[in-house]
């Protein structure tokens, strides 16, 4: 799945410009690569997408900051 699916489910696309949606889609793909996910239908991929959307809705628009936050959070969880 792409992050656009989750944006549509969350009715969040209305909050973001087309350029921001593209940036969120790019950061989603990069994060999945960083975390080693191949299966976009993996439930964890959905968690990643929802976290990205949450951060963006809260005002974070810097893709590098979103990526760092999400990767750090998921890597910390995997160490537990």
Image (tube, grey):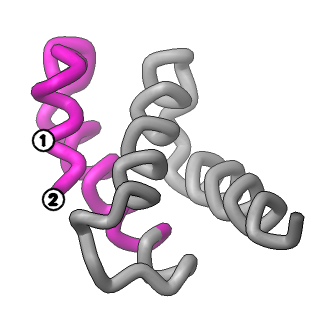
Residue at horizontal 41%, vertical 37%?
50
**For residue 73, above or below residue 79:** above
**Location of residue 25 by image quarter:** bottom left
Q: Which mark is residue 5?
A: 1
Question: Which residue was labeled with disc 2?
Answer: 1
In the foreground, 25 or 76: 76
Binning the other alpha carbons within 10 Å of mark 1 as few (below 14), some (14 to 19) or many (20 upward) gives few
Residue at horizontal 49%, vertical 34%?
61
**For residue 27, above or below residue 39:** above
- Tell me the SS state at disc 2: loop
**For residue 73, above or below residue 10:** below
Binning the other alpha carbons within 10 Å of mark 2 as few (below 14), some (14 to 19) or many (20 upward) gives few
Estimate the x, y position of residue 41 in percent, counting from the top left.
23, 64
Estimate the x, y position of residue 69 in percent, counting from the top left.
70, 50
Residue at horizontal 58%, vertical 47%?
66
Main SS of the magenta part reads helix
């Amino acid at each position: 799945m792409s992050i656009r699916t989750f944006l549509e489910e969350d009715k969040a696309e209305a909050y973001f410009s087309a350029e921001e949606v593209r940036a969120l889609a790019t950061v989603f793909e990069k994060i999945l690569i960083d975390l080693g996910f191949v299966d976009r239908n993996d439930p964890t991929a959905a968690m990643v997408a929802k976290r990205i959307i949450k951060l963006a809705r809260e005002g974070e628009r810097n893709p590098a900051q979103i990526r760092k936050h999400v990767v750090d959070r998921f890597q910390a969880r995997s160490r537990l």
